[in-house]
Image: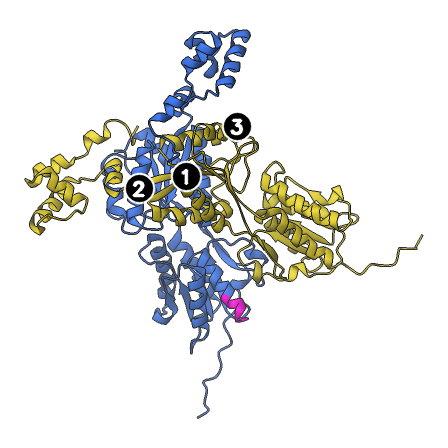
Chain colours: A yellow, B blue
Amino acid sequence: VGQVGDGSRSARRPTMTDVAAHAGVSLKTVSRVVNGEPHVSPDLAERVRASIHALGFRRDASARQLAMGAAGRLLGYIQVDAANPFFGAVARGLEEVTLPHGFLVITGSTDADPEREGVLLDALVEARVAGIVVAAAEGGDEILRQELDHGTAIVCVDRLLDGATCDVVTSTNRASTRTAVQHLLDLGHRRIAYLGGTPTVWSAQERRQGYLDALTAAGIGADPGLLIEHVDTSTLAAAATTRLLEHDAPPTAIVAGQDRIGIGLIEALHRHAAQHEVAHIVFDDLPLGGQLEPPVAVVRQDATELGRAAGRLLLQRLDDGTTAPARRIEIPAAFEPRRSASIPPPAIDEPDRSP
Amino acid sequence: VGQVGDGSRSARRPTMTDVAAHAGVSLKTVSRVVNGEPHVSPDLAERVRASIHALGFRRDASARQLAMGAAGRLLGYIQVDAANPFFGAVARGLEEVTLPHGFLVITGSTDADPEREGVLLDALVEARVAGIVVAAAEGGDEILRQELDHGTAIVCVDRLLDGATCDVVTSTNRASTRTAVQHLLDLGHRRIAYLGGTPTVWSAQERRQGYLDALTAAGIGADPGLLIEHVDTSTLAAAATTRLLEHDAPPTAIVAGQDRIGIGLIEALHRHAAQHEVAHIVFDDLPLGGQLEPPVAVVRQDATELGRAAGRLLLQRLDDGTTAPARRIEIPAAFEPRRSASIPPPAIDEPDRSP
């Protein structure tokens, strides 16, 4: 097996001592050149560099880290799905804030599987990360609680950790969803459907609750036929939309609980040529959503800012230690009422009196 | 500093010996229960589990890995930008193929910075990954070549490694771009602009070359005013599109070299109400591209399949060892000629004879 990280690796590699011998200089001189320190004559430095090149010498990670001081330290980021742009944008925000402090972020996907979360958590600990940002897998909370108990610096992003006090950054999921649904109610919509994700995920729960809050405040009972959950993929969401449109009493407006659900919703509305008939709003920004016809109203979650805030909390936690009180930050998710949210409900017909 | 991976961590954690003492059983019995081995009476197993729970015992990573055998091993994936859906989809394909073999993937972003690539490479080696899939940073090739020389199993994805033999998986960048441009030429377009990314990136070079191949085959010299590069973001691409549209002799068709460039192109075309006038094609699929008006023709790169193929090559490489010949796989990128590619060039006017 060709591999990395076995014990023989360092033996195969040339060392600074080899470089010193090859160049005919002291080890200290090699060290100075390698670490970019002053007090080496240009002539000597050139000889050392030539030997480094000839031998293929490279500092190993620990030497590099010692030399760089803060640089080269690691943070872990446990996400649900690397292919989901939301989690990718969080990763970018996290990197943006922590890189200037010398941290690199290593990450892995759990697919919301607690077993994978556990293995990743172990792997990150083995890789000597200084702290971990995690979008907790459903049911995986026990593992995280144990890590917290053992003094690991952990910041939760997008989701809370049940029964544990932990720094956490989320969007204003509930309030922003309520605002979006309120906009539809103000236009006169009464049959508003909601397409949601896995309801055990905290952020999905919150958004559903925001939808229900708005209905309740308007004195409208939730119609179980209009609250559809577990449609996390665009394919499932498109199928659910088709069923809603073929319903005896179809909704006059549909809200999608996240971007992939929104993509399925819009695909199905277009397929049924219903995009100008049924008002629709998507939680999460969609690339080119403003160029669709009608332009799609969105609740713009600032995933990059969620990542930045998580990074700042983690840096703070590393400074303060794990016994300082936990902090909670909510990042506003802004409702952008483009034209798809301004489609009015159909005029109410007189009751049908035909026999 | 609250941290993980310091020497004191194992001391704070309860060990199997602690569990054995608490339960009043032998260490071997605890080990059997922890590793799910047979030959433990239900009664004893229950006592051990109660003690595990009471003490908060958890196997550490190395014990877990020993117990799980193949499971829990790590692969590294060095990508350019975790927030770019292309690299996220590659990560998913990689995970899909390697997870059934017991591997988890840890990853980090280089932002095409060779220094970050080097630090990540070191970090992955420290984390004892069995092999690495990498989308090489520009200029970072020297570091990778050294790792290859040191016997690290490396598979390149999306980009070749200059001057090194290494397993590599790419899309059919050049041929597929040529096909797309050929489609425009067949419709009579002669002024076809190309918006490309950083030309030192191998895949960007290949796509540009495919554009030039098609023009050359049609006997059309490349107009330097229509070949625009270094517009890697949607903002830059939108600005470049605006400049093209305001050109004295604007192009009648525009090809975008990747998805973000495509988003900027489409935003600008819509802003100038030119989306029905100027034919356009985007390399990379766009979510909801088929729902835009006109639907956007794309060259659909199968990023997930690139990741799968890279995973298969890496597994094979780990079996074969690093001295076996390098393999190269090309994954077809399919041209999907939606309506935006069928916009004809304007009818040729008689030469203007006014004074």
Residue A99: x %, y % from top left: 36, 47
Residue nearest the observer in this picture, B273 or A182: A182
> Which residue is under mark 1?
A320
Residue B52: x %, y % from top left: 49, 17
In the image, what residue occupies the spot 8% across and 50% down? A41
Secondary structure of residue under mark 2: loop
In this view, the residue farthest toward the left is A24
In this view, the residue farthest toward the right is A355
Residue B142: x %, y % from top left: 24, 46
Q: Which amino acid does label 1 sit on?
A: Asp
In the image, what residue occupies the spot 51% across and 17% down? B54
Magenta residues (range)? B268-274
Q: Earlier in the sequence, mark 3 or mark 2?
A: 2
> Which residue is under mark 3?
A142
C-beta proximity under 8 Å, tags 3 and 2: no
| Of the two numbered discs 3 and 1 in the rendering, the one whose residue sits closer to the viewer | 1
Secondary structure of residue under mark 1: helix
Residue A19 appears left or right of A268: left
> Which residue is under mark 2?
A72
